[in-house]
Amino acid sequence: MLDSAAVAAGTGGDARQPERWGSRFGFVLATAGSAVGLGNIWRFPSAAAENGGGAFVALFLLVILVVGVPGLMAEVGLGRRAGRNALDAFLAVRPGTPWVVAGALALLASFLVLSYYAVIAGWVLAYVFKALSGALRGLEVPALRETYADFVRHPWQPVAWQAGFLALTAMVVVGGVRRGIERWSRILMPGLVVLLAILAARVLLLDGAWEGLVWLFRPHWEDVSGRAVLRAMGQVFFSFGLGMGVMITYGSYLDRGEDIHRSAVYVAAADVGVALLAGAVVIPALFAFGLPIEGGAGLLFATLPAVLGQTPFGDVLTVAFFVMVTIAALTSAISLLEALVAFMDQRLAIPRIVASLAATAAVFLAGLPSALAQGPWGIVIDGRDFLTVVDTLVSDVLLPLAGLLTALFVGWVWGVAPALAELRQGAGWFPERLWSLSVRLVIPLTVGTILVAGLLGVR
Ligand code: PHE
């Protein structure tokens, strides 16, 4: 990738000036939209409940402070400095640098994550309509599990919904930074918060919900193991989209006058807020009905609909729940697609509309084995289905590797002094030493640990 195209990037690439965000609020909403996703809803609550409740929450907050916020600042700062997509950002700051590999890995990671993320999001979208049609009404957990199994095993339905979800994503990204991503984030993110608040209010009024809330927030230190720590680190990494080029890309549209530190704190607050609120819906709901605490598909498609279905206004609540999860997934998918489109647009000089359609088509094809994973054509590798294999590979190896290289690049190659000079623009006071320490040592050590654990297969 460093041949004539690199030289051309100095001319052809620069000719395309990227768009800018309309306001900092728009940037914060879009970035929070990227962070808040399926991970907050189907991973965080069960991870917290199983790994020490309040102790896990405390750990999660700590990792956010020492890794999440500084990492986010580093990527957004690099993006703003360069004014370029995830790959060219490295070259813009250090021409000819071999560290551009980090950018390439990040784009590969975005591509792979979006390929299976869109499959799961497609299931969620399908469930909006299942709930609307009344097909889930009155079903108990075993029947719901069967409905889910039949659906994901269907030879073509998951593919159709995957395509539908990707079409929604592409429609937003085609509109560009301001008229597409920013405008939709302004509509979708407040909608998500309202729906989640309604759900939380309803669930917390159920008998027995209180015990669930106490379980979620009371620290159980005896449940905190090395694995719990790994899980908290992995959670923050995936949620903040570090090592995927997404934050570099969103940062490249940001004006010098904006305060990156403060924006990163707002994004972190939104991410934590939604994770905790989701926890306050999920765990108390399961407690109230004496259902097992689980995460993932079982939670989304079986236990939670069963609970919601049995409460007054259950139909409406179930629809609200799936719409809420669809929104969370959509704003995340938008950011993943945008990272790819920005690259194609700026580096390959492909017009946005063509780039959006081409990237979406490629992601769709790459996601097909994941969409078909549970069905008759499912490929099984080492006893695991294709979607799980890709997810594991990306979360355990690719993301930590790209994140590690990016942090090392910012901390040691670009250097903390120039990076801080960039971050200071538009910013008030922030703990600069702590930031440097984090980017140079804490993030590399954390991510290095995730990587080694991933390579050793510790989960
Ligand atoms: N943060 C999103 C989630 O938690 C997923 C995501 C990862 C989005 C990387 C963008 C980039 O579901």
Image: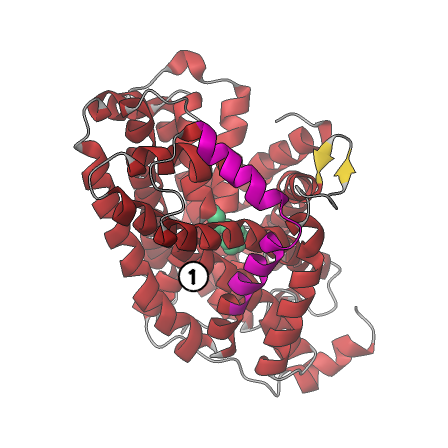
How far across and how far down the image is residue 160, in percent?
59, 60
Residue with the most extreme right position: 3
How far across and how far down the image is residue 166, in percent?
55, 64
Query: Is residue 352 shown to the viewer in this render?
Result: yes
Residue 299 in which image quadrant: top left
Task: Name the residue tied to disc 1.
Answer: 423
Magenta region includes residue 94: no
Q: Is residue 308 left or right of residue 372?
A: left
What secondary structure characterizes most of the magenta part? helix
Q: Secondary structure at mark 1?
A: helix
Amino acid type shown at disc 1: Leu
Q: Is residue 295 above or below residue 409?
A: above
Magenta region includes residue 156: yes
Label 1 beta carbon less than 8 Å to ligand 1? no
- Between 189 and 376, the one nearer to me in the picture: 376
- Between 316 and 30, the one nearer to me in the picture: 316
- Between 286 and 145, the one nearer to me in the picture: 145
Residue 388 in which image quadrant: top right
Q: Is residue 170 above or below residue 130?
A: below
| Quarter of the image where the N terminus is located | bottom right
Q: Is residue 29 above or below residue 39?
A: below
Query: Is residue 435 shown to the viewer in this render?
Result: no
| Quarter of the image where the C terminus is located | top right
What residue do we see at 58% from left, 81% from top?
352
What residue do we see at 78% from left, 36% from top?
381
- Between 70 and 281, the one nearer to me in the picture: 281
What residue do we see at 43% from left, 61% from top?
423
How far across and how far down the image is residue 294, in percent?
45, 27
What residue do we see at 62% from left, 57% from top?
159
What residue range appears in magenta? 142-167
